[in-house]
Image (cartoon, rainbow, N blue to C red):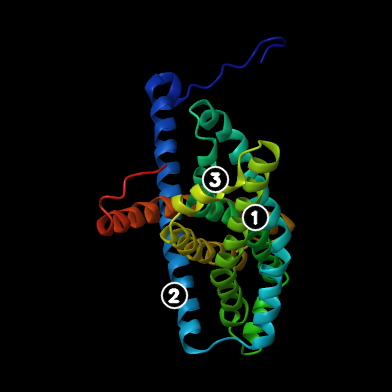
Amino acid sequence: MLSGTTAPRPTTDSDQNPDWAHNSQWAQWIVGCGTRVVHGVTMIGDMSLFTWQMLRWLMTRLPCRGTVLVTFYQVGALSLPVIALTGTFIGMVLAVQSYVQFHAIGLDSHLGVVINSTLVKELGPVLAATMLAGRVGGSMAAVLGTMRVTEQIDALTAMGSDPVHYLVVPRFLACILLIPALTVVADFMGILGGYCYSVIILGIDHAAYLSHSRDGVALFDLFSGVFKSVFFGAIIAVVSCYQGFNCEPGAEGVGKAATTAFVYSFVFILAVDLFLTIVLNSVYYSFFPNDSSFL
């Protein structure tokens, strides 16, 4: 080869057929979509088997009291401050956002109906579950993921203990029993925050505010919010424990498990909330078809 000359570039399939590279990209995209679909279906099936194994232990043998009480304290008592603050500020924000519209039409005293009804039916359960998915669910996934990485779960199996019974069932019980109670706390603090801001800051008459609030919120509204929170708690427990049990090796895997647990829990909570809201509204209006007034 002479000095200063360049060797000819070998021809490729893309040079001979310009559509080949474009078709290859489409094939890679289709393969990627198929891989994600297969991964999603596999994860749903694996999570279903994981849930069935947990429910089987729950129906046959309950965990020991010491393990349950410690988990209850971590899920319930330690979550009270953040839930109380969240509920209080939600009620105040609703008062601030709704006051201008209600004041413009002369319905200031009806402000409590919107605040309380929105809190007990939707915002209270959903936002409380979201906060607990971040705090409780992320903590569960991180703890169980660390135990998986350090082979503590394998050690439990080697000692003859079932990890699902020892680690998952107490967390599931804590979530389905205490998250509804924490939702009631969030509702109460939100109602109190909305009342204080409306009466003290906005100057609305407290007697009329309380009267309309009492007449505008039914017991079924409170029941629907608490009922949905039971499903939210089950979602947080199952998703977080599953992600922790299937954590990837290393510190990065633990962080990814905690993040994935929160994201999946949040998405499932919103999806289940939509489904349950449709079902509960259908049930309510089938029993009370003439109840169409909101204010």
Residue found at x 63% / y 40%: 93
- SS class of the residue under badge 2? helix
Q: Comparing marks 2 and 3, which lies closer to the viewer? A: 3
**Which amino acid, by three-letter code, is at mark 3?**
Ala
**Which amino acid, by three-letter code, is at mark 1?**
Met
Q: Give the image location of residue 107, x and y in percent.
A: 50, 34
Q: Which mark is residue 14?
A: none
Task: Locate the N terminus and report the quarter of the image it occupies.
Answer: top right
Q: CA distance from mark 1 to mark 3?
A: 20 Å
Residue found at x 65% / y 55%: 189
Establish if 45 lies above or below 294.
Answer: below
Q: Comparing marks 1 and 2, which lies closer to the viewer? A: 1
Q: Give the image location of residue 61, x and y in percent.
A: 52, 89
Q: Give the image location of residue 282, x and y in percent.
A: 29, 54
**Which amino acid, by three-letter code, is at mark 2?**
Trp
Residue found at x 45% / y 63%: 223
Q: Is residue 147 left or right of residue 208?
A: right
Q: Which mark is residue 189?
A: 1
Q: Give the image location of residue 183, x and y in percent.
A: 57, 60
- List the residue tagged with mark 2: 52
Q: Is residue 133 visible?
A: yes
